[in-house]
Image: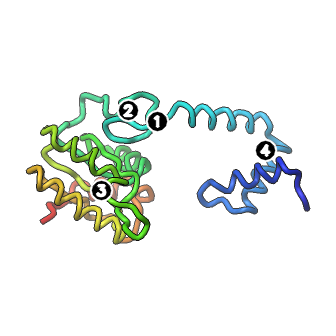
Amino acid sequence: MSFSPLTRELIEALTCLPGVGPKSAQRMALHLLDRDRAGARKLADSLQQAMEKIGRCERCRNFSEQPVCHLCAQQSRDPSLLCVVETPADVIAIDQSGSYRGYYFLLLGHLSPIDGIGPREIGADVLEQRLAEGEVKEMVIATGTTVEGEATAHYLSEMARQHGIVASRIAHGVPMGGDLEYVDGNTLTLALKGRRIIE
């Protein structure tokens, strides 16, 4: 079946979503066009609003509509604890576990020289400024357990050491090769409680 140019464009646009291949994108596009045009308009409006108004928090680099996100604005959090994660999904997973009450810093990835991702690309300069402020006493490193995640953790632990800050690593219960966003809350609670000092 051949589609009109705009239908083809819609299908191609939907394939940018993770896990959505051409067939899934085709089903979604046809569903929106055939059965849920109101939903499609709402989706389009929400996407446009989000792209225009959501930026990054100046403190932690998480998504925010304000210069400082709602988590960084919470004064009830412990300023001596800073949890460093790779993605916004990791922040959500850890925060929903209820076992961590410090602040966060997002790397938005991990070190991967082969892909051209070095310290600058993961915001190491911004993190270093944060550590230099003197409030942080322990940096909880919650990068993934992939090879890149481990290399990033080692790099971050060295950075913390240079500032006289204790570097700990979440440990128990997080499977090797796994991503934090897929780990359940109880497992994350154990991992945070069982974190260890990196030597």
Residue 190 screen position, x and y as percent: 27, 57
Going from N to C along the chain, the mark reached first, 4 or 2, is 4
Q: Write the residue at 28% across / 51% down.
A: 124
Q: Write the residue at 78% across / 44% down.
A: 32
Q: In this figure, which residue is indicated by the disc labeled 4?
A: 32
Determine crowd level at label 3: few under 14, some 14-19, many 20+ residues with C-alpha closer than 10 A.
many
Residue 120 screen position, x and y as percent: 33, 53
Element assignment for label 4 = helix
Kindly report the distance in space between the C-alpha atoms of the residues bearing marks 3 and 2: 20 Å
Determine crowd level at label 2: few under 14, some 14-19, many 20+ residues with C-alpha closer than 10 A.
some
Q: In this figure, which residue is indicated by the disc labeled 1?
A: 55
Q: In this figure, which residue is indicated by the disc labeled 3?
A: 142
Element assignment for label 2 = loop
Determine crowd level at label 4: few under 14, some 14-19, many 20+ residues with C-alpha closer than 10 A.
some
Determine crowd level at label 1: few under 14, some 14-19, many 20+ residues with C-alpha closer than 10 A.
some
Kindly report the distance in space between the C-alpha atoms of the residues bearing marks 3 and 4: 39 Å
* Above or below, comparing residue 53 to residue 19 in the picture: above
Q: In this figure, which residue is indicated by the disc labeled 2?
A: 69
Going from N to C along the chain, the mark reached first, 1 or 3, is 1
Q: State if disc 1 and disc 2 touch (CB < 8 Å).
A: no
Q: State if disc 4 and disc 3 touch (CB < 8 Å).
A: no
Kindly report the distance in space between the C-alpha atoms of the residues bearing marks 2 and 1: 10 Å
The kind of residue on which mark 1 rests is Gly
Element assignment for label 3 = loop
